[in-house]
Amino acid sequence: MNHTPSKLVKASAITCLAICFLALLWYTFFALKVQPIPQDEILDSYTYQAPEDIKMTLKDIGDRNYSFSYRSFDGAVVNGQISYPSIEQESYPVVIGISAMGRSHQRWWTGSYKGRPTVTRVNEIGRSATEKGYVLVAIDARYHGMRKDPKKTLRSIMNNLHFFGDKTDYEEMVRNTVQDYRVLIDWIRTQKKLDSSNLNLVGYSMGAQIALLIGGLDAEINRVIAVAPPYLDDKTAAVAPKNLASRIVNPEVLLITASDDEYASHKENQHLYTAIASSKKEHLTFKGNHILPGNYIDALVSRL
Protein backbone atom coordinates (compact mmCIF):
# COMPACT_ATOMS: atom_id res chain seq x y z
CA MET A 1 0.00 0.00 0.00
CA ASN A 2 1.32 3.43 -0.95
CA HIS A 3 1.15 6.32 1.45
CA THR A 4 1.19 9.94 0.40
CA PRO A 5 3.75 12.19 2.12
CA SER A 6 0.95 14.04 3.95
CA LYS A 7 -0.35 10.80 5.48
CA LEU A 8 3.14 9.80 6.60
CA VAL A 9 3.69 13.20 8.20
CA LYS A 10 0.33 12.97 9.95
CA ALA A 11 1.09 9.47 11.26
CA SER A 12 4.51 10.59 12.52
CA ALA A 13 2.97 13.58 14.27
CA ILE A 14 0.37 11.41 15.98
CA THR A 15 3.09 8.99 17.11
CA CYS A 16 5.20 11.83 18.51
CA LEU A 17 2.20 13.26 20.34
CA ALA A 18 1.39 9.85 21.81
CA ILE A 19 4.98 9.39 23.01
CA CYS A 20 5.03 12.88 24.52
CA PHE A 21 1.72 12.24 26.24
CA LEU A 22 2.95 8.95 27.72
CA ALA A 23 6.18 10.62 28.84
CA LEU A 24 4.19 13.38 30.52
CA LEU A 25 2.02 10.82 32.28
CA TRP A 26 5.10 8.93 33.48
CA TYR A 27 6.78 12.11 34.73
CA THR A 28 3.62 13.32 36.45
CA PHE A 29 2.65 10.11 38.21
CA PHE A 30 5.76 7.91 38.46
CA ALA A 31 9.07 9.76 38.07
CA LEU A 32 11.00 10.59 41.23
CA LYS A 33 10.81 14.24 42.20
CA VAL A 34 13.40 16.31 44.02
CA GLN A 35 12.39 16.37 47.69
CA PRO A 36 14.99 18.06 49.93
CA ILE A 37 14.99 16.94 53.57
CA PRO A 38 16.40 19.00 56.46
CA GLN A 39 19.59 17.45 57.80
CA ASP A 40 18.07 17.01 61.27
CA GLU A 41 15.32 14.86 59.80
CA ILE A 42 17.87 12.76 57.90
CA LEU A 43 19.82 12.25 61.13
CA ASP A 44 16.66 11.24 62.95
CA SER A 45 16.00 8.59 60.30
CA TYR A 46 19.30 6.93 61.24
CA THR A 47 18.54 6.69 64.94
CA TYR A 48 18.78 3.11 66.13
CA GLN A 49 18.96 1.11 69.30
CA ALA A 50 21.54 -1.66 69.25
CA PRO A 51 20.63 -4.76 71.25
CA GLU A 52 22.61 -5.29 74.45
CA ASP A 53 23.66 -8.70 73.13
CA ILE A 54 24.03 -8.96 69.37
CA LYS A 55 24.72 -12.70 69.70
CA MET A 56 27.98 -12.48 67.78
CA THR A 57 29.08 -15.95 66.68
CA LEU A 58 32.50 -16.56 65.14
CA LYS A 59 33.63 -19.69 63.33
CA ASP A 60 37.30 -20.43 62.63
CA ILE A 61 37.70 -21.09 58.88
CA GLY A 62 41.50 -21.30 58.94
CA ASP A 63 44.53 -19.08 58.37
CA ARG A 64 43.37 -16.56 61.00
CA ASN A 65 40.07 -16.07 59.17
CA TYR A 66 36.68 -16.26 60.85
CA SER A 67 33.18 -16.22 59.44
CA PHE A 68 30.66 -14.61 61.75
CA SER A 69 27.03 -13.67 62.22
CA TYR A 70 25.22 -11.32 64.56
CA ARG A 71 21.83 -9.77 65.19
CA SER A 72 21.41 -6.21 64.00
CA PHE A 73 19.32 -3.40 65.51
CA ASP A 74 16.09 -4.81 64.07
CA GLY A 75 16.85 -8.46 64.76
CA ALA A 76 18.03 -9.21 61.21
CA VAL A 77 20.87 -11.72 60.94
CA VAL A 78 24.04 -10.25 59.44
CA ASN A 79 26.83 -12.44 58.10
CA GLY A 80 30.41 -11.62 57.25
CA GLN A 81 34.09 -12.42 57.64
CA ILE A 82 37.02 -11.09 59.67
CA SER A 83 40.71 -11.73 58.95
CA TYR A 84 43.74 -11.12 61.13
CA PRO A 85 47.28 -10.45 59.90
CA SER A 86 49.72 -13.35 60.01
CA ILE A 87 51.92 -11.55 62.54
CA GLU A 88 50.55 -11.39 66.07
CA GLN A 89 50.12 -7.88 67.44
CA GLU A 90 49.00 -6.43 70.76
CA SER A 91 46.20 -4.60 68.95
CA TYR A 92 45.16 -4.18 65.34
CA PRO A 93 43.95 -1.23 63.29
CA VAL A 94 40.82 -2.13 61.33
CA VAL A 95 39.76 -1.81 57.69
CA ILE A 96 36.04 -2.26 57.17
CA GLY A 97 35.38 -3.20 53.54
CA ILE A 98 32.02 -2.11 52.13
CA SER A 99 31.00 -3.73 48.87
CA ALA A 100 29.45 -2.37 45.69
CA MET A 101 25.84 -3.12 44.81
CA GLY A 102 25.35 -6.73 43.85
CA ARG A 103 28.60 -7.87 45.47
CA SER A 104 28.87 -10.15 48.48
CA HIS A 105 31.39 -9.73 51.29
CA GLN A 106 33.59 -12.54 49.96
CA ARG A 107 34.82 -10.20 47.20
CA TRP A 108 37.24 -8.65 49.69
CA TRP A 109 39.11 -11.97 49.87
CA THR A 110 38.89 -13.48 46.39
CA GLY A 111 39.63 -12.46 42.81
CA SER A 112 36.68 -14.51 41.56
CA TYR A 113 33.46 -15.62 43.22
CA LYS A 114 30.98 -18.10 41.78
CA GLY A 115 32.84 -18.00 38.49
CA ARG A 116 32.69 -14.22 38.13
CA PRO A 117 35.74 -11.98 38.51
CA THR A 118 36.00 -9.30 41.17
CA VAL A 119 36.21 -6.47 38.64
CA THR A 120 36.47 -3.81 41.35
CA ARG A 121 39.65 -5.55 42.58
CA VAL A 122 38.79 -4.91 46.21
CA ASN A 123 40.39 -8.26 47.05
CA GLU A 124 43.73 -6.60 46.32
CA ILE A 125 42.88 -3.88 48.82
CA GLY A 126 41.96 -6.54 51.37
CA ARG A 127 45.18 -8.47 50.86
CA SER A 128 47.31 -5.33 51.10
CA ALA A 129 45.50 -4.21 54.24
CA THR A 130 46.23 -7.44 56.11
CA GLU A 131 49.84 -7.37 54.88
CA LYS A 132 50.12 -3.91 56.42
CA GLY A 133 48.86 -5.23 59.77
CA TYR A 134 45.17 -4.34 59.54
CA VAL A 135 42.31 -6.57 60.51
CA LEU A 136 39.90 -6.79 57.57
CA VAL A 137 36.15 -7.01 58.17
CA ALA A 138 33.24 -7.11 55.71
CA ILE A 139 29.55 -8.03 55.79
CA ASP A 140 26.79 -8.55 53.24
CA ALA A 141 24.53 -5.60 52.59
CA ARG A 142 20.77 -6.04 52.85
CA TYR A 143 19.44 -8.20 49.99
CA HIS A 144 22.99 -9.22 49.00
CA GLY A 145 24.96 -12.44 49.21
CA MET A 146 23.60 -14.76 51.87
CA ARG A 147 20.90 -12.17 52.64
CA LYS A 148 19.15 -12.29 49.27
CA ASP A 149 15.37 -12.27 49.34
CA PRO A 150 13.55 -13.75 46.30
CA LYS A 151 10.59 -11.48 47.11
CA LYS A 152 12.78 -8.39 46.98
CA THR A 153 15.52 -8.75 44.40
CA LEU A 154 17.97 -5.99 43.54
CA ARG A 155 16.43 -5.79 40.07
CA SER A 156 12.96 -5.21 41.48
CA ILE A 157 14.29 -2.63 43.95
CA MET A 158 16.03 -0.67 41.20
CA ASN A 159 13.11 -1.04 38.77
CA ASN A 160 10.78 0.36 41.40
CA LEU A 161 13.16 3.25 41.93
CA HIS A 162 13.81 4.19 38.31
CA PHE A 163 10.60 3.21 36.51
CA PHE A 164 7.89 3.58 39.14
CA GLY A 165 9.32 6.30 41.36
CA ASP A 166 9.08 4.14 44.49
CA LYS A 167 12.23 4.73 46.51
CA THR A 168 11.05 2.99 49.68
CA ASP A 169 12.94 -0.27 49.25
CA TYR A 170 16.09 1.37 47.90
CA GLU A 171 16.38 3.88 50.73
CA GLU A 172 15.54 1.19 53.28
CA MET A 173 18.23 -1.11 51.84
CA VAL A 174 20.93 1.55 52.08
CA ARG A 175 19.82 2.96 55.44
CA ASN A 176 19.54 -0.44 57.11
CA THR A 177 22.90 -1.52 55.72
CA VAL A 178 24.42 1.63 57.22
CA GLN A 179 22.87 0.65 60.55
CA ASP A 180 24.16 -2.92 60.24
CA TYR A 181 27.67 -1.54 59.90
CA ARG A 182 27.16 0.79 62.84
CA VAL A 183 26.12 -2.14 65.03
CA LEU A 184 29.25 -3.97 63.85
CA ILE A 185 31.38 -0.91 64.66
CA ASP A 186 29.83 -0.80 68.16
CA TRP A 187 30.97 -4.39 68.63
CA ILE A 188 34.47 -3.69 67.29
CA ARG A 189 34.84 -0.95 69.90
CA THR A 190 34.29 -3.52 72.67
CA GLN A 191 37.12 -5.78 71.44
CA LYS A 192 40.42 -5.22 73.25
CA LYS A 193 42.49 -6.60 70.35
CA LEU A 194 40.92 -4.18 67.85
CA ASP A 195 42.10 -0.57 67.89
CA SER A 196 38.91 1.48 67.96
CA SER A 197 40.95 4.67 67.50
CA ASN A 198 42.05 3.45 64.07
CA LEU A 199 38.86 2.48 62.22
CA ASN A 200 39.05 2.85 58.45
CA LEU A 201 36.10 2.55 56.06
CA VAL A 202 36.86 1.56 52.46
CA GLY A 203 33.92 1.33 50.08
CA TYR A 204 33.39 0.96 46.33
CA SER A 205 30.35 2.42 44.52
CA MET A 206 27.34 1.79 46.79
CA GLY A 207 29.92 0.81 49.39
CA ALA A 208 31.50 4.27 49.02
CA GLN A 209 28.07 5.83 49.43
CA ILE A 210 27.58 3.86 52.65
CA ALA A 211 31.08 4.72 53.91
CA LEU A 212 30.43 8.44 53.44
CA LEU A 213 27.08 8.21 55.21
CA ILE A 214 28.68 6.43 58.17
CA GLY A 215 31.43 9.05 58.19
CA GLY A 216 28.74 11.72 58.54
CA LEU A 217 27.06 9.85 61.39
CA ASP A 218 30.08 8.69 63.41
CA ALA A 219 32.64 11.35 64.32
CA GLU A 220 35.07 8.76 65.71
CA ILE A 221 35.80 7.06 62.39
CA ASN A 222 39.48 7.58 61.59
CA ARG A 223 39.43 7.46 57.78
CA VAL A 224 36.91 7.20 54.96
CA ILE A 225 38.08 6.01 51.55
CA ALA A 226 35.27 6.36 49.03
CA VAL A 227 35.90 4.83 45.61
CA ALA A 228 33.57 5.80 42.74
CA PRO A 229 30.52 6.74 44.82
CA PRO A 230 27.38 7.35 42.76
CA TYR A 231 26.16 10.93 42.96
CA LEU A 232 22.66 11.12 44.43
CA ASP A 233 20.53 14.24 44.43
CA ASP A 234 17.51 15.03 46.57
CA LYS A 235 15.31 12.55 44.75
CA THR A 236 16.76 10.14 47.32
CA ALA A 237 17.80 12.73 49.87
CA ALA A 238 17.85 10.40 52.90
CA VAL A 239 20.70 8.30 51.45
CA ALA A 240 22.57 10.98 49.47
CA PRO A 241 26.10 11.43 50.87
CA LYS A 242 26.12 15.12 49.95
CA ASN A 243 23.50 15.74 52.62
CA LEU A 244 25.74 14.47 55.43
CA ALA A 245 29.06 15.62 53.93
CA SER A 246 29.12 18.73 56.12
CA ARG A 247 29.25 16.42 59.15
CA ILE A 248 32.36 14.57 57.94
CA VAL A 249 34.69 16.75 59.98
CA ASN A 250 37.10 14.55 61.93
CA PRO A 251 37.86 11.62 59.61
CA GLU A 252 40.54 11.78 56.96
CA VAL A 253 38.83 11.42 53.59
CA LEU A 254 40.15 10.05 50.32
CA LEU A 255 37.72 10.41 47.43
CA ILE A 256 38.67 8.40 44.34
CA THR A 257 36.65 9.03 41.19
CA ALA A 258 36.69 8.30 37.46
CA SER A 259 36.96 10.83 34.64
CA ASP A 260 33.99 9.31 32.80
CA ASP A 261 31.76 7.68 35.40
CA GLU A 262 28.22 7.04 34.23
CA TYR A 263 26.98 7.40 37.82
CA ALA A 264 28.76 10.64 38.73
CA SER A 265 29.95 13.44 36.47
CA HIS A 266 33.15 15.41 37.05
CA LYS A 267 31.06 18.36 38.26
CA GLU A 268 29.08 16.16 40.67
CA ASN A 269 32.25 14.61 42.07
CA GLN A 270 33.68 18.08 42.63
CA HIS A 271 30.48 19.16 44.34
CA LEU A 272 30.63 16.19 46.71
CA TYR A 273 34.31 16.77 47.48
CA THR A 274 33.72 20.46 48.21
CA ALA A 275 30.82 19.58 50.52
CA ILE A 276 32.99 17.29 52.69
CA ALA A 277 33.93 19.39 55.73
CA SER A 278 37.14 17.59 56.74
CA SER A 279 40.34 19.61 56.37
CA LYS A 280 42.19 16.32 55.89
CA LYS A 281 40.77 15.36 52.53
CA GLU A 282 42.16 14.41 49.14
CA HIS A 283 40.56 13.84 45.74
CA LEU A 284 42.15 11.58 43.12
CA THR A 285 40.69 11.16 39.63
CA PHE A 286 41.62 8.27 37.33
CA LYS A 287 40.97 8.08 33.63
CA GLY A 288 38.19 5.61 32.91
CA ASN A 289 34.64 4.71 33.81
CA HIS A 290 32.89 3.33 36.89
CA ILE A 291 35.13 0.26 36.93
CA LEU A 292 38.41 1.99 37.65
CA PRO A 293 41.77 0.98 36.13
CA GLY A 294 43.96 -1.18 38.34
CA ASN A 295 46.41 1.56 39.25
CA TYR A 296 43.87 3.07 41.64
CA ILE A 297 44.76 0.23 44.02
CA ASP A 298 48.37 1.38 44.50
CA ALA A 299 47.28 4.96 45.17
CA LEU A 300 44.71 3.79 47.73
CA VAL A 301 46.90 1.28 49.54
CA SER A 302 49.78 3.74 49.83
CA ARG A 303 47.51 5.95 51.94
CA LEU A 304 46.54 3.26 54.43
Image: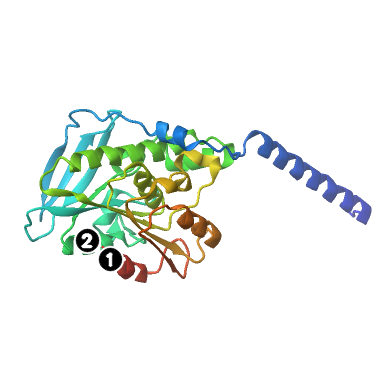
Relative to 172, say whether 137 is above or below: below
Q: Seen from this angle, which residue lies furthest front? A: 279
Residue bearing the label numbered 2: 129
Q: Amino acid at mark 1?
A: Val
Residue 220 visible, this orientation: yes
- Along the polypeptide, which appears first: circle 1 or circle 2? 2
Q: How many marks?
A: 2
Measuring from the top left, give residue 223's x and y in whole percent. 30, 54
Circle 1/circle 2 CB separation < 8 Å: yes
Q: Residue at x 43, y 44 (%)?
A: 244
Residue 102 seen: no
**Residue 289 pos. (x, y %):** 48, 64
Compare residues 160 and 259 and report the one nearer the observer.
259
Separation (CA) of disc 1 from disc 2: 7 Å
Q: Check the image and report above or below for 39 versus 270.
A: above
- In the rendered image, which quarter is residue 279 located in? bottom left
Q: Secondary structure at mark 2?
A: helix
What residue is rendered at 20% in x and 32% in y?
54
Position of 304 with respect to 245 (left or right) is left
Which residue is tagged 1?
301
Nearest the viewer among 149 and 299 is 299
Q: Quadrant of the C terminus?
A: bottom left
Image quadrant of residue 34? top right
Q: Measured from the top left, where is residue 39 in percent x and y?
A: 47, 38
